[in-house]
Amino acid sequence: METDNFDTLSVAVDSLTRKGYTDSFKAEEHCIVALYSKKEYQPEDLKIVHSFRFEGMTNPADETELFAIAAKDGLKGTLVMSYSAEHSQNVELIKKIREI
């Protein structure tokens, strides 16, 4: 994927959706779930194609990272990871996904 520079998270997600990253992933306790297709994956079934970091508007410490992810079965989607104190992602599972 070519490198894009995005000013906001919403612009990045919109652009990736137009490029075929149409599902949304969430890292739960034991697996990573594709929210629209309801498929469940293990980290070894996924690859991070690209990632983008965004700093908070009011507090630069409130970082968010957007991952463009491709599954072995062809499904593509995005995963949004907030580094704030109030996030609901399983960070350890996300760290196990390999980057290409």
Image (tube, grey):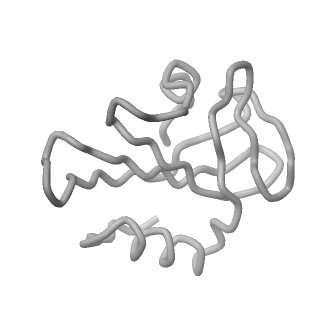
Residue 77 % position (x, y): 64, 58
Residue 78 % position (x, y): 57, 55
* 59 versus 32 height, above or below: below
Q: Nearer the viewer, residue 52 or 26?
A: 26
* 80 versus 87 height, above or below: below
State the residue at coordinates (51%, 51%).
49
* 3 versus 31 height, above or below: below
State the residue at coordinates (75%, 40%).
33
36 relative to 97 in the view: left or right: right
Total marks shown come to: 0
Residue 27 % position (x, y): 63, 33
67 relative to 56 in the view: left or right: right
State the residue at coordinates (30%, 70%).
8
* 69 versus 44 height, above or below: below
Q: Nearer the viewer, residue 99 or 55?
A: 55
9 relative to 96 in the view: left or right: left
Q: Residue furthest bottom?
A: 18
Residue 92 % position (x, y): 52, 18
